[in-house]
Amino acid sequence: MPSTMKSKLMGVEDALDLIKDGDSVAISAVGMTGYPEYVVAKLEERFLERKSPGGLTLFAAGGHGGNGHACDNHFAQPGFLKRHVLTHPKSTPELKKMIANNEMEGYCLPQGVLNQLYRCTAARQPGLLSKIGIGTYVDPRQEGGKLNEITKEDIVQVIELNGEEYLFYQSPKVTVGIIRGTYADESGNVTIDHEALKLEMLEVALAAKGCGGKVIVQVEHIVQNGTLNAKSVVVPGQLIDAVVVAEDFETWHRQANPPGYDPYITGEARSPKGSVVKPKPVVSPNDVVCRRAVFELFPGAIINLGVGFGSGAGEVAAAEGIEDQLNFTLELGSFGGVPLAGRRFGVALNPDSFVSPPTMFDFYHGENLDIAVLGAAEIDKDGNVNVSRFAGVPDGQGGFIDISTSAKKVLFCMHMKAKGFEGEVTDGKLMIKQEGSIVKFVEKVEQITYNGKIAKAAGHEAYFITERCVFRMEEEGITLIEIAPGVDLQKDILDQMAFAPIVSKDLKLMDERIFTPGRMGCFN
C-alpha cells in the first residue's frame, strides 16, 4: 500500500529556512568525517547574502575542522555566531582566532561530557553530574571552561553529594540539529552504510526534538519508502524535518579526510591481515616513542589511542602482528581493528563494531579502559599535563580529559623538547643532532588538562615516554626509570628540564629492540 506520509525531501534553500536568528545549532561530525558540508556551506552563503540567520550558538562535540575554509570554519563570519561551545578550538583556526579576539563567547568542555549533555537535553534533564573535569581548567574554581574575557556565564558548578565533589554541567538548549547519513527514504529514515562512524547523530537529533526544534539531514541518496532495512536505520524519520541530497559527493560529502571511499573503515569489508602495516626499515625518534609505548600493552588490554604521538602506537602494534590480541577503541565509537593515524585519525581499519560517542564515553567514564596512549605538551613536577592552552591561546583537548581521568594507566607520548629537535637512530643508539628550543618538562604548566595529584590519589598509573627516556609517576614524584642508549643523563635529560626529577636507583637502558628495525617481539 503506498505511503501517505508527506515527503521530507527538500532543496537546500528550503531546508535552510528552518534555521532562524538566535538559534542554537548542534552538528554531529569529527573533522570531515560525517560533516554535513553541503548544508553548512550553503548556510554560510545565505548569511553572507542576507546577514541572517545570525547570532547563533554552535555546539561541536568533535573537532569540526577540515582543509582550508571548511566545516565549522564556515561560521567564522562577524555576527554569524554569538557563542561557540566546543571541545577542540585548534581544529577550526578561523573560529579560534575570533574567540581569542573576543568576537564571540567561547567554552571548551570535555568531549564526552558534551556528547552526554545532548542526551540530558533530549530527556529534558537539567544537566550532567560527573567527576570528569575536577581539578582541571574546566573546574569553575579554575576557569570553568571559559575561553575569553567576554564569556561570563557559569555553565559548570561544583556540587557536593553524599560527601563527594562533582561537577554539574548545565544541559544546552539545541533548537537545530544538522547531521549526515548515506541513504534516507522519503519519510526521513536515515542509514549510515558508507559513513566511517556512527557519531552522535541520533543524540543530536533527539536533543533538538527535546527542545521543540528542527533536524536537517544531508545524505548521498534518497530512496523509496519501505526499501530500507529497518535495523540499518540509525535515525528514525520521526526525528527528521528535512532531507537534503548533496550535489557532489567528493566535494560536499567526503567519507573522511583525505577524500576517497574506503570500505575497510566502514565495516562493509575487511582488509586481509598482513597487508595492513609492514615494519619500517628505519627507526626514527618518533618511532622510538611509539615502539616503547607498545611494550606497556598486554594481551586482552582495552586501549584508547589519542591524536598525535599516541595514534602511532596502533600502527606499531599492527606491524608487530599483535593487533588481534589487543582491544583498540576510539572515543568516536569504534571497537576493534587498527586505529589509523595522521589525517585519518578517528577511524579504524577493520573495526569490529560501532557505538555512538556518548555510549563510548559511558564505557570510558566507567573506568573500563586499561590503557590510554595520549600526547602531552607540558608536564610539571606534580605530574600535571597541559595540552589545551599555549601563550594564552586555547587549543582545546577533545576527549583528553575524559580519557586521561578514567584510564587505569596513561602513557603520555612526546618528544623531550619541542621545536627544532632533530635526532637519528644509528647502530641501536639515539643520536641527538639538534636540541629542541622549547622545554616541555616545566616548573608549572600553563593550564591543567590532567591533574597528576588527583590521578595518583585515584590509584591510576602515568608514564611519560620520550625518544630519550621514560618517566613514571610514583608516590614521591616524577621518577626517571629508563634512558635510551647513546644518551647522556645529565646533558641530554636533566639539563633539559625545568625541575629535577627523581632518578630511580634501578635506572636502566630502554630495551634495545626498540632501536632495531623490524619486529620487536614484545609479546614473546
Image (cartoon, helix red, strand yellow):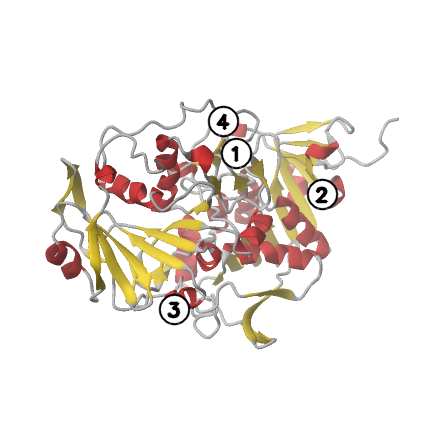
Q: Earlier in the sequence, mark 4 or mark 3?
A: 4
- Helix, strand or loop under label 2: loop
Amino acid type shown at disc 3: Lys
Number of the label disc, if any, that sits on residue 164: none
Q: CA distance from mark 1 to mark 3?
A: 35 Å
Q: Earlier in the sequence, mark 4 or mark 2?
A: 2
Amino acid type shown at disc 4: Asp
- Return the residue at label 4: 262
- Residue 163, image quadrant: bottom right
Depth-wise, is mark 2 or mark 1 nearer the camera?
Answer: 1
At 40% from the left and 65% from the top, the residue drawn is 456
Is the C-beta separation of discs 2 and 1 under 8 Å?
no
Observer-nearest residue: 479 or 238? 479
Q: Is residue 47 visible?
A: yes
x and y, in percent, of residue 301 in the image = 46, 44
- Return the residue at label 1: 351
- Helix, strand or loop under label 3: helix
Q: CA distance from mark 2 to mark 3?
A: 46 Å
Q: Is residue 163 left or right of residue 17?
A: left
Q: Earlier in the sequence, mark 4 or mark 1?
A: 4
Q: Quadrant of the N terminus?
A: top right
Q: Earlier in the sequence, mark 2 or mark 3?
A: 2
Amino acid type shown at disc 1: Pro
